Image (cartoon, coloured by chain):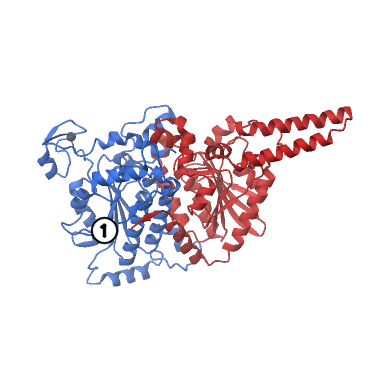
Amino acid sequence: MLKKNFRMILDFEKPIVELEKKIAEMEEYARETGMDLTEDIARLTKKVETLRKDVYSKLTPWQRVQLARHPDRPYTLDYIQRMAGDFIELHGDRYFADDPAVVAGIARIEEFRVVIIGQQKGRDVKENLYRNFGMSNPEGYRKALRVMKMGAKFRMPVISLIDTPGAYPGVGAEERGQAEAIARNLLEMSHLPVPIVIAIIGEGASGGALGIGVGDVILMMENCWYSVISPEGCAAILWRDNAKAPQAAEAMKLTAPDLLEMGIIDRIVPEPPGGAHWDYDQAAATLKTFILEELRRLVTIPPQELIEKRVEKFARMGYWKE
Amino acid sequence: MDWFKRKKGISGNERKSIPDGLWVKCNKCNEIIYRRELQKRMFVCPKCNYHFRVTSKEFIQYYFDEGSFREFNQNIRSVDPLKFKDSKKYTDKLKEAQKKTGLNEAVVTGDATIHGQPVVTAVMDFFFIGGSMGSVVGEKISRAIDRALEKRVPLIIVATSGGARMMEGALSLMQMAKTSAKLARLSDAGIPYIAVLTDPTTGGTTASFAMLGDIHIAEPGALIGFAGQRVIKQTIGQDLPEGFQTAEFLLEHGFVDLIVARQEMRATLARILRILWPINGENGKSREKLETAGAAANPEVHSDNSSPPGTGRQTAG
Ligand SMILES: [Zn+2]
């Protein structure tokens, strides 16, 4: 269960990890001394399971935000590697540059030829500098759109994986039209004549996330957040205090169950006990099952009907009175 | 990313609203101007051409034919889906804004004419919670798009907004997708949409309908951008270049077609509409005949929705 060479343990994960360590030590001791500790180990194993269930069944929104940002969490390429066969990554927006914060390419998933796009974070400092912490420049959105349009041309459905702390707020990004790049994707994805399945796999921060987030079905993994701004950003503005981020996270209703209730997402994808970072294979297998179910349903819908339904889906979002 | 950080500056921005009193000091050149004089000049400084921020009511008066504006969907109001509260309740903020502006929400939508040419319009109001886009702004703009589509008349959106409305969380974010999806329909139907960008147009508003016009016109000096300047400065650790995120900057970088002074806006819109969407047609042809002829000559423009993937649709928008 315990992933090797893990680097970071969140506060609320600590008691579980401590117990697991203890079990491992007892097993080691039993092996070395030949003493029979089976009963004790079984008791502790049961205890750790109960504890795990207890901790993860009542996570606060802020704890979920931390899980969504967990540095060991599987990223886009980890999922692609496990879900798809023969992934060929494609590069560049054909106008300016290639943006490593966004991955785009073609692949096969079971019976489907697909386009996969997704935001990619880095695992360490060096990789994060290369990936710009998963914060896309306009080129990233334009690359994604270029590859999606190619997918449409060859009648390949699109799978889009969202995991970003936001679009990059830089001078060059503004000069090259960050706003236009996102806006264009919103419009073009709205009427792309092939099925689009969106999955939020980590952080879904504001327009930066939505820029690859318009589709027929929106899946969200259990321990993710998706909102108009980060909890820190919201706290800084409305509470004038970054440290109020946990309160902001609570107020913003940014977890998967909240978003399901508001009709913003369609399905919650369960994660392995303790979160996706404890078992990449299982996390990817579950996500793949969900994506395949949706694709098999969506490919039977004629393109024009698909587009009509997609526009109507987003048109329904919001609450008002009159 | 945190484009809403810009909102931090809104209290400062709101001070840039039209000040009361007989005399008004220009925000840019500090000239003291007689209020009546400024009013006559559509709140444009006679000395330095600074365009003061004005309310939706003034924009309607300046941009459209006198008395032509007929509001619709006036009574759509915000609710508080998140039961949001920071130092104040969202419901209280809404009440205050309604009292202060006399408006129900941050956008006013209606039918109007420009030099006699019918249009559908949505005019935002910065003085209502910073012109921020929540569910109601998204819904009213979407319905205006539907109406333009139904009546087959051009759409004009006058944008002024600090971005998405935080107090509605992800619901406000989704209004970007909602309005853009509706604009895809309008575009596919071959109906013109002109975006008029005024000071300020930022965040989620810019990253959706404000950047999706067939033609983008900005008022001089307007702040237009995606990320807030404070956030950018923090991120790059440097000062921002002179004139960054102004209308002129966007023109230089290719995201705005024209910069047009407030006094010239109506005439400019009329000229564009006469070419893009002549009401009496051309050479005696009716509007309908013109459209049919156009469609025949250039099928991609009015792309048939049943076209196969990868053809007409791909060029739309
Ligand atoms: Zn002046």
Front residue (pair B126, B290): B126
x and y, in percent, of residue B162 in the image:
34, 42
Q: Position of residue A203 (x, y in %)?
A: 53, 41
Which quarter holds ligand 1?
A: top left
Asked whether residue A137 appears in the rendered view, the answer is no
Hue of chain A? red
Chain in blue in the render = B
Q: Which residue is mark 1?
A: B110
User: Of the residues shown, which amino acid type is indicated by label 1?
Assistant: Gly
Left or right of B150: which side holds B284? left
Residue B63 point in image, percent of width and height: 21, 52
Q: Quadrant location of the C terminus of chain B?
A: bottom left
Relative side of A48 to B76, left or right: right
Q: Position of residue A236 (x, y in %)?
A: 41, 33
Identify the residue at horizontal 47%, vertical 48% (top origin): A210
Read off the chain for label 1: B
Single out the residue that lies furthest toward the right. Answer: A34
Q: Name the image quarter holding the N terminus of chain B.
A: top left
- Circle 1 sits in a helix, a strand or a loop, which is it? strand
Residue displayed at 21% across by 33% down: B27
Residue in front for this viewpoint, A108 or B136: B136
The answer, for residue B222, to whether it is visible in the render is: yes
Q: Quadrant of residue A207?
A: top left
| Vertical comparison of A291 with A180: above or below | below
Could you say which is closer to the camera, residue B297 or residue A321? A321
Locate residue B249 relative to residue B264 in the image: left or right. right
Question: Which class describes the residues within 10 Å of circle 1: few (<14), some (14-19), or many (20+)?
Answer: many
**In which quadrant of the rendered view does residue B115 lie?**
bottom left
